[in-house]
Image: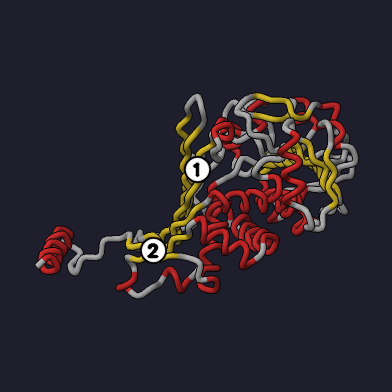
Amino acid sequence: MGVDMLHKPSSELNLVPFVSVDDMMKIVLDIGVENMLMGICDYLEEDFKRWELFDKTPRVASHSNEGVIELMPTSDGEVYGFKYVNGHPKNTKEGLQTVTAFGVLADVDTGYPVLLSEMTILTALRTAATSAMAAKYLMPKGSKTMAMIGNGAQSEFQALAFKSICGIENIRLYDTDSAASDKCIRNLDGCGLSIVKCDSEQLAVEGAEIITTCTADKQYATILTDNMVGSGVHINAIGGDCPGKTELHKDILLRSDIFVEYPPQTRIEGEIQQLEDDYPVKELWQVMTGDVEGRTNEKQITLFDGVGFAIEDFSALRYLLDQLKDTGRYQDLDMVADPDDPRDLFGMILREEQRQKREGA
């Protein structure tokens, strides 16, 4: 953790660093998108390799017909973190973001918050870094081409993460909305990737060693059918993230070795909600620690059924906190009451009343 930020003088503990959207954009530009993706990936790897230390629970979700609002908490025993996040696919039709989020870190010893941050941009970065980290352990060796089905808000981050972390050189795009693919191509212009826009999912996956599915509709969907997926590929399925929302035909799952973040959550929200509750899956953290095998042969289909888990947000926030001292891109918020006597909270109000009377006089 960022020790300097966690152990401030007692006189400053009421001041909590806040990273706004504006600050976050400036931090990303200061550090560089690809450098930030790689940095977050390093923190993710550190935390996945100490996975057993964390409190773990499926996210607390409030579902509606239009979307979902969720809280995602975790702690490593020293620092507590949570993210508030929504998912409302209809929002894009109204000119709004599908996903918005903010996050908090707190010192377990005192319970005092030490960071409040926007997480709409940070979630996109951590999701892409997590995808690429999983692929680094599961993809065919020497992979150079990725198909990306769904070219919305996450697509550029995914492309740059796979470029910087996995060495991908070629991206094959497909979206039911052609304008989304055009947007992605414009945004990635000059980034060093060779990008091809395709007219169908089938054309997009041709020649790709990695297939990323990242669509937004809250429904059981079949973005990939079984005949589209040949042997030896790695599938990065990250669009399914709530009950009733999937992207892959069930037969693809039955042919694949499936790797997940936290099984109790993924069985509710991921592609594997289509399978029996006891269907065998492997946990990604165990591949990273060497306790479980990942890719074992050239013909194997590996599938990362990624739904997003609280430890990933914790890692991203932990990375962000450690960047604040160097970037200075934050504001101090007066968030925690700081009475002269901890037992006299009401006295703070009386003193403020007296101050206002003096200034008014």
Q: Is residue 119 visible?
A: yes
**Element under label 2?**
strand
> Disc number at residue 85?
1
- Residue pointed to by mark 2: 16
Q: Where on the picture, by quarter, is residue 358? A: bottom left
For the residue pair 46 and 176, the one nearer the viewer reads as: 176
Q: Residues within 10 Å of mark 2 (few under 14, many from 20)?
A: many
On the picture, is 274 further left or further right than 104? right
Residue 310 in picture, x, y percent from top left: 53, 48
On the picture, is 339 further left or further right than 239? left
Q: Residue at x 55, y 40 (%)?
A: 97
For the residue pair 6 and 93, the one nearer the viewer reads as: 93
Residue 1 in the image: above or below residue 296: below
Residue 24 in picture, x, y percent from top left: 54, 59
Q: Residues within 10 Å of mark 1 (few under 14, many from 20)?
A: some
Say if mark 2 contacts mark 1, CB within 8 Å. Answer: no
Q: Residue at x 47, y 52 (%)?
A: 103
Pick the quarter of the image with the C terminus: bottom left
Task: Give the residue type that dot 2 points to.
Answer: Val
Q: Is residue 140 visible?
A: no
Q: Separation of disc 2 and disc 1 at Cα?
A: 21 Å
Q: Where on the picture, by quarter, is residue 10? A: bottom left
